[in-house]
Image: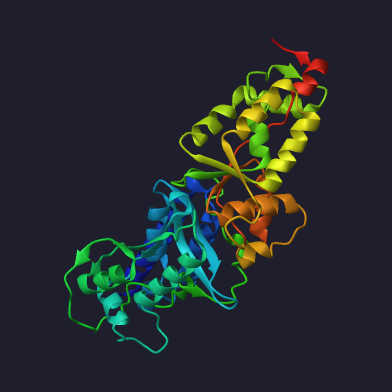
Amino acid sequence: MANSLDLLSMLKEKINFGEDLMLRLEVVKKIDGVSKLQRKIRQEVEFLKRLQRNKMIKLEQLSCSNLRHLGAMVDRTLKPGVLAVCKIFHINDESKLLIDIISDEGKTWTKVIARNPKSLTALSTGKASYGSRSILDQAEDYLECAELYPCMYKSPKVIFEFTSGIEQSLANKLKVIGVHVQGDILPDSHTGDDCNDSSESTSSDEELMCNNSDENNFEDVPPQCIQGHSELTTLNLDVTAMMAYISNMTNGHCNYIFKQDVLTQQSAWEAERPVKPILDRLFEGKTLVCCKTAWDDFETIVENLGGTMEKKRASNLKKIVTIFPDDHNGPNDISRQNLKVRGHVRLRSKIIFNFGHRIKALTVSANEGFLRAALQQGVTYAAFIHESRALTEGKQNSAIQTS
């Protein structure tokens, strides 16, 4: 039995470990959810400090610290490609699921498990207290949730990362149901006496299904894949994308100071960050489409505001873009059809983005405001976001040319 001095020394080590974890996260503090992870670590450290002040320490209290799991979370968060951590998703009206790590532009979900391998095997075979959830139960939750929140029209890949290893038989069961297993694969112990393993808290259901937690809101769900490339070969062009593509500003005429401040600002951005080369690379080898609403509105804008060269580019663009009816490819899914038109969710944008979702295309747009507003209603879209550029040829006569 450890004496009080040994326990105090162990306690101090755990406190130092927790404080070091919070410091290590500072370098990735901008990643969505890192502040929540730091808060969880801080709560553990504060609990340990209260024990230190009271000097009434029991070995079980140290054993129940969740810092081991949180430390593994920190190690995984510091790896490249992490988009978000500690994110909450709804499975149904009553249940939510916490996803440890989201990476690969939203296409991969990772759960980090630091528990003793023998304990995991015992729990998965039912040798645990009533109501305890096994790693197989958690795997089913992850897979079910991944189907509800596709990224680029595919369910995210689910990875279970076992930092202390996993026994062969349990690893095989996970692989069979579709979970990718990472960590050392260990021989089966064939024992079931470790289900109450004290090396990690058995009350870490915070990692699992979270019910009625005030801290976690549905608005925490990250906008999966609203930016970035994918393997998708069909591009759905928004009005903003087509305007940026044909604008005089993006086709060699950004050296103007306009009477309109917003155009002057866009010209300065264009000189620093040209949009047309980005769109050209994106369009290369892809099928370009748009819905009738998008093309009709684009055509009206060009007719009213476009100059001679911009109108010619619009005519050339029409030759490479296939225009479909708004309802092409059947009805939209219920959640997107019921998206409320308000604020930044305009009817035109809803039609265009829903069309892209229906045909499983990547929508190319400068309308990031719509995506944020839709997300607040729990709806995400696969989209590539570029900077906005207006038509400027008609404004050049009243502008000052800078070079």
Quadrant hosting residue 168: bottom left
Give 224 or 71, whichever is nearer the viewer.
224
Quarter holding the N terminus? Answer: bottom left
Quadrant hosting residue 273: top right
At 39% from the left and 66% from the top, the residue drawn is: 11
**Above or below, comparing residue 345 to residue 47 in the picture:** above
At 65% from the left and 45% from the top, the residue drawn is: 368
Residue that protrudes farthest toward the bottom in the picture: 130
At 17% from the left and 76% from the top, the residue drawn is: 189
Question: In the image, 214: left or right of 308?
Answer: left
Quadrant hosting residue 176: bottom left
Question: In the image, 180: left or right of 295?
Answer: left
Where residue 90 sits in the image (x, y, percent)? 56, 70
Give 173 or 124, whichever is nearer the viewer.
173
Where residue 233 sits in the image (x, y, percent)? 47, 44
Where residue 240 sits in the image (x, y, percent)? 67, 39
Q: Is residue 110 visible?
A: yes
Looking at the picture, the colour scheme in use is rainbow
Quarter holding the C terminus? Answer: top right
Give 374 or 246, whichever is nearer the viewer.
246
Where residue 50 sits in the image (x, y, percent)? 50, 70
Q: Is residue 58 visible?
A: no
**Above or below, comparing residue 113 to residue 32 in the picture:** below
